[in-house]
Amino acid sequence: MAPDFPWLTAIIALPALSTLLIPLLPDKEGKTVRWYALIVGLVDFALMCFAFWQHFDPQATEFQLAESYRWLPSLGIQWSVAVDGISAPLVLLAGFVTTLAMFSAWQVNQRPRLFYALMLLLYSAQIGVFVAKDLFLFFLMWEIELIPVYLLVCIWGGKRRRYAAMKFLLYTAAASIFILVAALALSLNLPGGPNFDLGAIAQQDYPLGLQMWLYAGLLVSFGVKLAIFPLHTWLPDAHGEASSPVSMLLAGVLLKMGGYGLMRFNMELLPDAHVRFAPLLVILGVVNIVYGAFSSFGQTNMKRRLAYSSVSHMGFVLIGIASFTDLGINGAMLQMLSHGLIASVLFFLAGVTYDRTKTMVLAEVGGLGQVMPKVFAMFTVGALASLALPGMSGFVGELSVFVGLASSDTYSATFRTITVFLAAVGVILTPIYLLSMLREMFYTREMDLSCDLGQPTNVAIAGNAPVCFGNDCVLPSNAIYEDARPREIFIATCFTVLIIGVGLYPKLLMQMYDAKTQTLNTSVRQAQAIAKQPSEPIAALQAPELSPLR
C-alpha cells in the first residue's frame, strides 16, 4: 500500500466507527461483543505497526505520514495528523495497552455493549491526542477522551465511583481550558490570520512575556494529567474506584499524555519560557518522587498504593524533560514508555487478585502465595520491574535521567547534588513499599478478621475456620483459590516480555525517538544560549551565600 494512504486517519477512525456496529451484534451475554472489540483492537494495532514499519523513518526529525484536510478553513482549523519520534512510540504504547486492557475485561457482564463501545471510543481519542498536528484538533481529542473515562469509572467503578469520576472530570476539564487559551493565543498571533498548525506555530517567534504566561497555563493543564504535585489528588481516587482495565489505561496511557504535552508544546513551541521554567520542573519532579514514595507507605488499599507509586515515577519524567541533555530527555521518554508497561501489568494483576479475594485492602489478604503461585510470581516480576531492577526497562529509564541531570552544565553542582540525592531517596523507598505489599499479600501471616457468619472468627488458609476476604465469607470447601488462568498468564507475559526486552536492549525503543529528542534539546539549548546569562548556570540555582550568625 502506498505511503500516501491515510494511515493515521484510518487508525483513528477504525475503533470509533466500529462502535456503530456494536448495537447490531446478536449477543445477549456479552461474549460476542468482547471478541468483536478485541479483534478491532488487534486489527488497529496491527495497522499502526505495519504503517510505522513500512513508512516511518526514525532518523527523520520532521513530521511523517502527514495528512491534512480542510475542516473549518475560515477559522484556520484542519484535520491535520502526523507522527514523529516523540509521538510514534506513544501511539504504539496506547494501541498495545488498550488492546490488552480490553482482553483483560472478560469478566465485565454489566452492560458489556456500552463498556466495549466506550473502550473503543477511548482507543480512538488516545491515538488522536498523540497524532494531532492541529492544535485545535489536539484540544478536541483531549476533551473527547474525558467522556469515556468518566463513564467507565462512574458505571463500572467501586462504591465511591461517582465521586472519583466527577473529581477526575472536574480536574481535567477545568485544566484543559488553558490548552484552548494557549491554542487561540498562539494561532491568532500568526501573520495571515488564525492558523492552528503546529508546524507554522513552531516557526513563529513569540514574545517572552506571552511565552511565560502560556507555559504556566499549559504546565497546569499537562500537570493535572501527569499527576504533578499538588495537582495529583484525582489520581488515587480514580485508581481506587476504577475497574482494573480502566486503571490500566489511566496509568499506562493517560498519564503519558501529560508528559507528551510538556515535550510537544512547552518544550518545542515555547523554548524561551522552558529555559526559565526548567528549574521549577526539576524541583516539582523531586517533590513528586519523594512525596509519592512516602505517601505509598500509608496506603492500605492495593491500587491506591500503586497509584502513588505512579505519582513518584512521573517525577523522573519531569527531571528528564528539564535536564538540558540528550540523555536526560531520552530517559524521560523511556521512563514514560517503561512506566506505561509496568504500571499496566501491576494494575492488571491487582484486578486478577481482586477477582479472587473481592477486596483491595491489604490487611484483608495474606498467604495467597501458597494457593496462587502463578499470580504471586507474575506480581513479583512486575514489582521488581517497578523498583528499577537492573535488566528491566525501569532501570534504564531512571538511570538515564539520573546521569542526564548529573552531567548537565546548566545547573550548579550544589543543585545537581541535592536533586540527585533526594531522587535517590525516592528510589530507595520504592522497593520498601512494593516488597512490603508483596509480603502482606502473598506470604502467610497471622490475620485477625471478623467474618459475618454469626460470630467473629480467625481467618486461615486451611483447616475448618471460615475464610474471609473483604465482604465475602465462605467455608474452605467453597472458597475459590483459582490460580492465574491461561488468558491472564498470556496478558501478563506480553507485558513482561517487553519490559525485560527493553531492559536488556533499550535501543529497541530509543532508536525510534533518539534523533527527535536530540533536535528538541538542540532547540532548547539555542534558546538558553540567547538568554541574558548563557555562560553561567541559572542564577536562581546557585548556592546562596550565608552570612555568619552574630
Image (cartoon, helix red, strand yellow):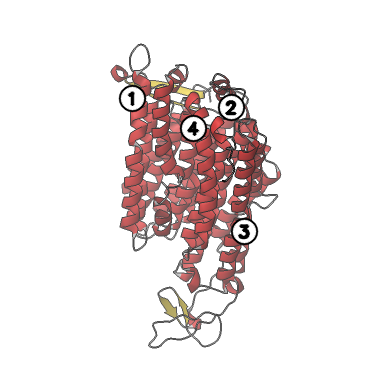
Q: Amino acid at mark 4?
A: Phe
Seen at 36% across and 57% down, the residue is 156
Residue that badge 1 annotates: 184
Q: Secondary structure at mark 1?
A: helix
Q: Position of residue 519 (x, y in %)?
A: 59, 24
Q: Position of residue 95 (x, y in %)?
A: 50, 42
Q: Amino acid at mark 2?
A: Asn
Q: Which mark is residue 277?
A: 4
Residues at circles 2 and 1 in contact by the CB criterion of under 8 Å: no
Reading the chain from its start, which is encountered first: label 1 or label 4?
1
Residue that badge 3 annotates: 431
Answer above or below: position of 96 versus 275: below
Question: Left or right of 293: which side holds 514?
Answer: right
Does the rendering let one see residue 410?
yes
Q: Amino acid at mark 3?
A: Pro
Q: From the viewer's perspective, is the residue at label 1 or at label 4 nearer?
A: 4
